[in-house]
Image (cartoon, rainbow, N blue to C red):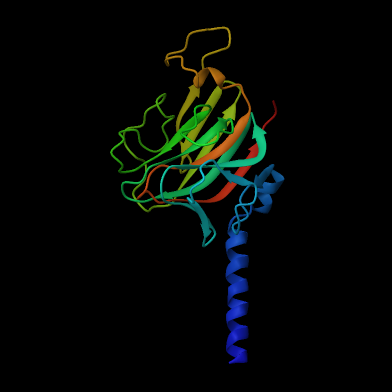
Amino acid sequence: MKRFTTLLLVLGLLVTASTAAANQPTAEMIADGWVSIFDGRTLEGWRSNEPTVGWKVENGTIVGFGGRNHLYYMGERLKNFELKLDIKINNDGNSGVYVKSQWQEGGWPTTGFEIQVNSTHRDPQKTGGLYNIVKILDAPHGDDEWFNMHIICRGREIEVRINDKRLYVYVCQTQDGTPQPEPITTRNKRISQSGYIALQQHHDGSIVEFRNIFVKKLPD
């Protein structure tokens, strides 16, 4: 029995080490300036904006469940940066990744930009779209399928790639009012601001998972 218990302990340690390692950048990424903002085991550095329980760490992933909730990474406010993360969403699930958002106690974030995560939810705006600004109507992935999202915020631009395929480069309204094709809104006029990264849990029944969350700061 003692030998069996020791074996289980060793296996548990190996699984823990494996899930943590899976969320760390490679040596090549580190050399290029990438850092991990999720350790694979805890929500250290992250903060939920709703009092209800809606986030947990399971098998090396951040899992969103239950009602509306937003999980902010509070480690640093970012302005020019790249963000890479792996995401999986269930059937009829809805989620999003926010950039340049300000901390907000409760409710839907009213600042920053949401990059949509949605493959089959009734909302016609699908994964990769810049919500209510650049609309993607066909999801580039299926339900319960891991995909990679790569967001680049540089100056007045937001570039979004899914599975290494560039979907678009959005160029924001300038501060001096130079017109752009997109409608001017409170959100897209604030592209030059620094802010937080946040993950969205949209509604009860939606289950979204995030892992391998890496950030690379770019020069201002």
Q: x and y percent of residue 96 in the render?
A: 45, 39
Seen at 46% across and 33% down, the residue is: 108
Q: Residue furthest left?
A: 122
Q: Is residue 185 above or below residue 99?
A: above
**Residue 115 point in image, percent of width and height:** 46, 34
Q: Nearer the viewer, residue 32 or 130?
A: 130
**Number of marks in the rendered image:** 0
Q: Residue furthest front?
A: 51
Residue 160 position (above or below residue 191): below
Instruction: Residue 71: give x, y in percent of width and height.
Output: 54, 43
Quadrant for residue 6, please give it: bottom right
Q: Residue at x 39, y 52 (%)?
A: 145
Quadrant location, the C terminus: top right
Whether 43 is drawn above or below 21: the answer is above
- Identify whether 202 is placed above or below 101: below
Where residue 135 sits, quadrant-wise, is top left
Q: Quadrant of the N terminus?
A: bottom right
Q: Nearer the viewer, residue 82 or 88?
A: 88
The residue sitting at 61% across, 30% down in the picture is: 195
Residue lying at the far bottom of the rendered structure: 1
> Where residue 46 appears, x then y in whole percent?
60, 46
